[in-house]
Amino acid sequence: MSDESSKSRTLGDVYRCIYYDPQSTRNSIADELGLSLPTVTNYLNALMEDGLIHMAGSLDSTGGRKANVYNIVQTVRYAIGINISARHLSVVLIDLGVNIIDMARVRKNFEDSEEYYTTMAGMVETLLDTHNISRDLLLGVGIAMPTIFNSDQKTVYYAHVIRIDNNTFSRMASFIPYPILFCNDASAGGMAESRFFPRDKSMTYLSLCASVGGATLHNGEVMIGDFWRSSEFGHMRIHPDGKKCYCGQRGCLDAYCSEKILSSFTEENLGLFFEQLPQNPGFQFVFDEYLEHLALAVINLRMCYDLDIVIGGNVGSYMADHMDALRKKVIRLNPFEKNADFVKACHSKTEACAVGVAMHHINSFVNTIFQ
Ligand SMILES: [Zn+2]
């Protein structure tokens, strides 16, 4: 490696230190990367001149002298995430710090048509125009869908929730004049949740949306399996010969724990179900049964992975007030543990799938900057 490319790589490493640790100081960066303090100062100055980082405050250091804290400038790049489900279309605009700048959501049945993609592209442009985002700063657009992709991430292995074929992606891309990538929706949701976990902590994410899926994350990366079908928790069989699943099998988790089990009582408005739950004994009965099935899924996942199990997706975003009830049911099923603190409600509550798929563009920018 030449001297110049080695310096450039180190500059990228300094940037990544600051990106992943908002408490970064000159000393902490020097320790982490094994660099001298004057060398770190040079790199910090270069990053500040490029407008990529700024001084964000100071920390008390042990010597009494305050140490400057450096943060990334979050508005130097943006990404768009789109979540397509059978009946809804959502678009979010995020910045480099994964802050949601704005979002739009419409009720719209998916169809592989010009009209649908024109609406989708229009929502993207409207968000960008509303916030005067220069297209040069847009890293790209990610699209999350209830689809299992082949390892090329462009052809479909399985798509029963929405009707698409292998030409759908190029048709879709022809309406979006930016770098574009596709991702399974539950994997994207797991990616969005992963930023609330330490990077070296693994976790299992159970996505409870219109369909049920999941993701297992390690070092901030989604485990993909041999054939990109890892963590398809929706088709774990929790009741052999039970309710019919859309996949054709019986007793799959999806048939018991999709959000539709709850939102079907409130005209697909899941928020309304949870709003009325405290006053409605009928809803309480339905929800208690729902939690019984969910507890079965959780204990199976705990036995498989021995990791924190995060309840995510649309149902997960309403679970914070119901974790005690779920944990009690999980404890009864657990042969090893007398508490169930490992079951957690998700932190990423707003359009997690769209945010997560947009994060692929952000992560790729951060991981390759100056390389
Ligand atoms: Zn199934």
Image (cartoon, rainbow, N blue to C red):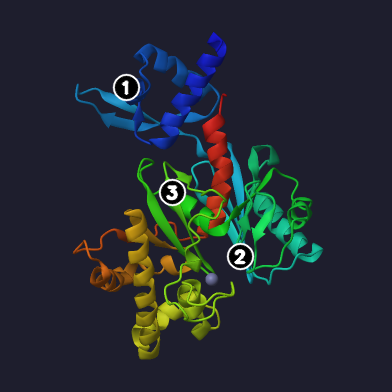
Labels 2 and 1 touching (C-beta < 8 A): no
Please report the residue visible at 31 percent of the width from the left and 71 percent of the height from the top. Answer: 326
Q: Nearer the viewer, residue 204 or 250?
A: 250
Q: Which residue is mark 1?
A: 31
Please report the residue visible at 40 percent of the width from the left and 84 percent of the height from the top. Answer: 286
Tell which circle, 2 or 3, labels the residue nearer the N-terminal end: 2
Q: Which quarter is ligand 1 in?
A: bottom right
Residue 126 image label: none
Please report the residue visible at 70 percent of the width from the left and 67 percent of the height from the top. Answer: 163
* Residue at the right extreme of this rendering: 114
Q: Which residue is mark 2?
A: 105
Residue flagged by tag 1: what amino acid is it?
Answer: Asp
Q: CA distance from mark 1 to mark 3?
A: 27 Å
| 194, above or below 1, in the image | below
Q: Nearer the viewer, residue 308 or 180?
A: 308
User: In which quadrant of the rendered view does residue 333 lie?
Assistant: bottom left
Tell which circle, 2 or 1, labels the residue nearer the N-terminal end: 1
Q: Secondary structure at mark 1?
A: helix
Q: Secondary structure at mark 2?
A: strand
* Rendered location of residue 44, percent (x, y): 45, 21
Q: Nearer the viewer, mark 1 or mark 3?
A: 3
